[in-house]
Every structure is written in C-alpha cells, then in structure tokens.
Image (tube, rainbow, N blue to C red):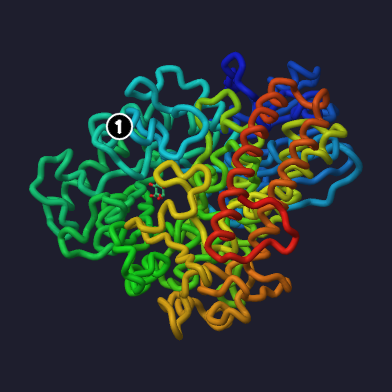
Amino acid sequence: MPLPVPVLPEGVDPAWLPPAAFRAVGGRRTLIRGSGPLAETVHGEVAEACLRFGGRVVRDTEPEGVAHDLVLDLGGADDPELLGEEGFTCAREGGTTTVTAIGGRGLLYGLFHVVRLGEAAFTGERARETHHPALALRMLDHWDNVAAHPVMGQVERGYAGGSLFWEDGRARRDLERVRAYGRLLAACGINALAVNNVNVHETEAHLLTDRIGEVAAIADVLRPYGVRTHLSVSFAAPVVLGGLPTADPLDETVRGWWAKATGAVYEAIPDFGGYVVKADSEGQPGPFAYGRSHADGANLLAAALEPYGGTVHWRAFVYDHCQDWRDRTTDRARAAYDHFVPLDGAFAADAVLQVKHGPIDFQVREPVSPLIGAMPGTRLAVELQVTQEYTGQQRHVCWLGPMWSEVLRFRHRPESSVGDLARGGLIAVSNAGDDPFWTGHPLAQANLYTFGRLAWRPDADPGGILDEWIRLTFGPGPEAAGLHAVLDGSWRTYEKYTAPLGVGFMVQPGHHYGPSVDGYEYSPWGTYHFADRDGIGVDRSVATGTGYAGQYAKPWAELYESPDTCPDELLLFFHHVSYGHTLHSGKTVIQHIYDTHFEGVEEVEEAREAWDSLAGLVDPVRHARVAERYEEQLRCAREWRDQINSYFLRKSGVPDERGRRIY
Ligand code: GCU
C-alpha cells in the first residue's frame, strides 16, 4: 500500500517541500518497480503529486507499448556495490527518465533528486549519473528535553518553539508532524537523528529503559523516510536507572547492565542507531569518576551495541569549565586534543568520536579543530551547530553554508579534507522545533537544508545548495536573485558586527544573545579576550603562549604561530596584539574593529531593504515574519556596533580615522 504523504497541521509551513515543488513529477506518467517499505513511501509521494497535477503512477508492470516519463526502479541497478543502500543512478533516454537504486533509501533519494531537477529532469537527454553520499551517517542531534528545564526551556539552545517530539512530559500522541519532519529531512539527505538532549536530565534518562516505547513510537514514523533513531544516554544510567553502586566501565555488573538494557532497546526498535554520550563535560557524569579513560567509557557502550550493529557517538567536548580566569596557562582550546589524542587507536570499531568543528564552541569564526587531523586510528564524526546559538539565535539571518564549507574543505594535511576525515559522519545540532516555520526565522530553514546537502557531499558548492533551496521553497520566480543576495553574505555580515578577528564570545552570559564584551572575561568558562589599554587577543603560540598552535600539522602550525602569517580573520584567536598592529588588509586592528562594525550594520540595513523589496513576491505570512525579525536584527546589530566600538575606543583611546559617532 502506498504510504500517504503526511498532512501538515493548519498553518505549518511546507518548507522546501511545497506541493508546487512536485509539479514536474506530478504532471507525468511514472512507473515504480520494486517492493519494500520505502518503495511504498515513494509511491505515496508520486501518487499525491499526480493527484494534484494530473499525472499517473503505476506499479511494477504495464501492458507493452505504454510509455513512461519516469521510471523509478528499485533493484534494477547493475552496480550494487557502487550504489550501496543509499545511492542511485539517474539518466534520460528516448523520452524516459530512469532512476535505479538497490536500497529503498536510494530510491527515495533518487525521487527527491528528480524533484529538485524539476522540469529539467524531463528535458532533452541526460547521460547516466551516479549519486551516492560521501558520508554514511548524516545526523541531527536534537537538544530536546522531554520536560521543560527550568533555565534552558524545553529545547536547549532552541530558537524555534518547543520540541517536535515531546509535549506535556511525554512523546506526542499525534506524530504526524514528526512524520512530515522525517520527510523534509529525507529530501535533503539526512538519515539519522537523536531525539533528546546531550545533557541527559533525570526524566530523559528513563527513555533508555522504562520509556523506550515512546522513543519507539517516534522511530516508527521516521523509518519510512529512511531516518534512524538514536538516543542520548547518561553514562551514570546503571546507577541512576539500574540502582547499581557504580557506573565503572570496567565493572562486570555494569557491562552486564548495559548489555541487557541495550538488548531491550533493540527489541523495541530493531533498527535503532545507537547512543550519543556527553561524558565528563559541563557536569555530565563520565569515566573520570572511576579513574578510567574515555576510551574505556566509549568501548563499554560500543560493546553493548556491537551485537546489533549500533554505534556509540562519544563527544569530544571535554574541558575544564571551572577554570580560574587568572590562570593563563589553562587553554580551553587545547582541551579536546590533549584529552583524546593520546587515546588514538584505543577506541572500538563501533565507537565514533564526535568532535565539534572548532576547538571552542561554535563561534562565528574559529579555526578548524586540530583534533580532527590528529586521530588517524579513530573513527571521527564532525559536529556542526545548525541551531544558531552564537550566530543570531534565529532572530538574525545568518546562513552558515560558507562557514561549514570552509571547515569541510580544510586540509590538515594535503591528502585529506575534513570531509574525508569525518568517516563516522557529519552531525549537527538541529535548529527545528514546533514553530510554524520549523526554525523560527523562516530563512533559517536554509541552514538545515544546507547541512543535509553538505553531509551528502561535503565538497559541494554551498552557493549551489542555496539556489536549490530557494528554487524548491520559493519556486523559480524572479525573487530568487533577491533571496540569494539576502542570504549569501549574511554570515560575514554577522561576523562583522560581533566579536572581531576570531576572538569569540563577547556575548551575554547564559543565554548568549546580544553583546556583553566582558560578559565572560572574569568567568570560569575559559573564553577570554584579554583586552587591555594596549591590545587584545589570546596568545596561543608555542613560543610565548599556550602552545595551542603547535597542535596543528605543518604548515598550519607555522602559519598560525606568527602574527605575520596568521590569517587576519583568526588573528585574535591566536595572538595578543596591539591595537596599532597592521593586518594583512593594511588596516590597524582598531580601525578594522571600527570599520567592520559600521559596515556590518550597514549591510543589515541593505539586506532588510532587499527583503522589503520582495514584498508581494513571496508568501505574505513568511514575508511578515522575516520583516519582523529584521527589525530585531538591526536593533541588535546596532547594539553590538555601539558597545564594541565604545568599549575599544575607551580602552585604547585611539579615535576612529573617519570620525564617526562612537559613544
Ligand atoms: C554549548 C552550549 C550548551 C551545550 C554544550 C554542548 O556549551 O551552550 O548548551 O550543552 O555546548 O555542546 O554540550
């Protein structure tokens, strides 16, 4: 039976799958071959489109002589090894477009490929192309709590309303919207998600055992879209849930407890993906309490998952969050490398080390984590943050495609890029919630879509992905150029009006929205800028600083070591320099700060005007929501500009060359 397409609740935005996106497919004659649950999903999609646009879909065979515009052929591919479960081929010959796949997911991804092509899929001839994902795991971590947390709310660092999965302290009874979410994710290539926060609070700890049925209900609706379900678990589960006196990873009773608990998980969810663990990090329990290593901890869970083919994603976000700001030798940026590089080779095959892309915490500009280039004997996953914790919290337009692309193309050594090294997958903290636009800011949908497509092909051109998203979401109309302009430079604009030259933070403590230059300066969190009357920045050189620059392979270690060769955009991340220091751009640091902060605000003003000019061309509800957010973005950008410029004028006493108003 074809699976009906999910029905969106009244008022919920269709995001990148509006009915019109299926016009080209829906107006044609399609033949679907093959069987299995995902073939039913594909059939349901095409049937719905045909109902709307007058086409026709048949299954398996038809009388001789009937021509098809589109053949979706599951099992018909002749190179199974190359295609795998998720790949597909696409060709057009003699008036028929043919997609072949070996696995159900491949067929579904092939259909969405045709949807993306639109009319072009049915025009002229197309040489046979083979598509398959570069990374097997393309996953979202939802930082969702079942119960609202008193400080963080329901979704930690969530800017899009409440959780899609959890409501009133339990899994939603009506999971139709979760089904629709799975569909959106499949259409951009995402194939896994973790349904709860990495900070596992007491209620959420129980999802692993007595509340696994709720997780299973969510897994059931995601499965037909090829999305596997994972769970964040507490390392202390044997104590908290099992009543054992210890969670020591080498203790036999502890190992037995995990084996049994994991067996029960697989009974409820046979295709369960595995566990996500934040251990010994920001107060979460971990193996250090027992004098054991993180490899011991990860391998304990890997052993429990191994019989079922599951994976543990063990996060490398381990650092001292109670450091003394007076102590300049402790450098948070060094922490992940220092903790984990000595363990290279010690992790089990089913353990994946999940590394944030930068050494600190998802700032608007950070160098690529040196750890990613230093663990050849370990399966690594790279973690991005789609939720805009430090990049405007979905009140500001900040399309992160260019930043992620820079990260994924970065090469610690010539032979492999970060995209190549992410053998354990690309993972991102989701930005979606139960907001009618899914992401709060309607244009933040572009970030979620871009993440999925970059996880499929880390070397893809992000600008091309942006255009794809615009075409699907808004149609092929004249507004496309305006939309592209509004989003394309938005990350650099955001960078201009916030913390300068890679120094990071300067945000309001706790919620991290809006400026507070010294907000974290005398805190225990290890995120300092060290500005004084003469200069600013963190000396992370080997010669005179914390030595962090030495964690890189050559040539990066040398390049970052000296302020003369360090790229401007990272100068204050690596060096403490005087305000009069001349950048490669020819400007002094202080003048750069002033100029970028004025420019950043001007760019927001221009973007807002560009958006205003699209009124009447885009859906009015969407237009109004974005317009409203631009007001806030502009207010906040001005606040950033004025606080940062005033702070540095007062510290340095150096006036703006151009005599602009600084307070
Ligand atoms: C950041 C974020 C936290 C989150 C943490 C993590 O520090 O502010 O809310 O828990 O990252 O990634 O674990």
Picture layout, residue 49 above or below residue 192:
above
Residue farthest toward the left in the current orientation of the protein: 245
Q: Secondary structure at mark 1?
A: helix
In the rendered view of the protein, which quadrant contains the N terminus?
Answer: top right
Residue type marked 1: Ile
Question: For the image shown, how many numbered marks are present on the structure?
Answer: 1
Residue farthest toward the bottom in the current orientation of the protein: 543
Other residues around mark 1 within 10 Å, as few (<14) / some (14–19) / many (≥20): some
Viewed as shown, does residue 618 lie left or right of 208? Answer: right
Place residue 214 in its image quadrant. Answer: top left
Viewed as shown, does residue 199 lie left or right of 633? Answer: left
**Residue 279: image x %, image y %?**
29, 54
Q: Report whether residue 233 is seen.
A: yes
Picture layout, residue 21 above or below residue 548:
above
Viewed as shown, does residue 407 lie left or right of 347? Answer: right
**Residue 654: image x %, image y %?**
62, 66
**Residue 201: image x %, image y %?**
27, 38
Residue farthest toward the top in the current orientation of the protein: 10
Q: Report whether residue 78 is seen.
A: no
**Residue 396: image x %, image y %?**
62, 40
Q: Nearer the viewer, residue 95 or 545?
A: 545
Q: Report whether the residue tagged 1 is closer than 8 Å to ligand 1.
A: no
> Residue at the location (69% across, 21% down)?
621
Residue farthest toward the right in the current orientation of the protein: 124
> Residue at the location (46% across, 22% down)?
175
Dot 1 corresponds to which residue? 212
> Residue at the location (58% across, 40% down)?
105
Q: Nearer the viewer, residue 216 or 556?
A: 556
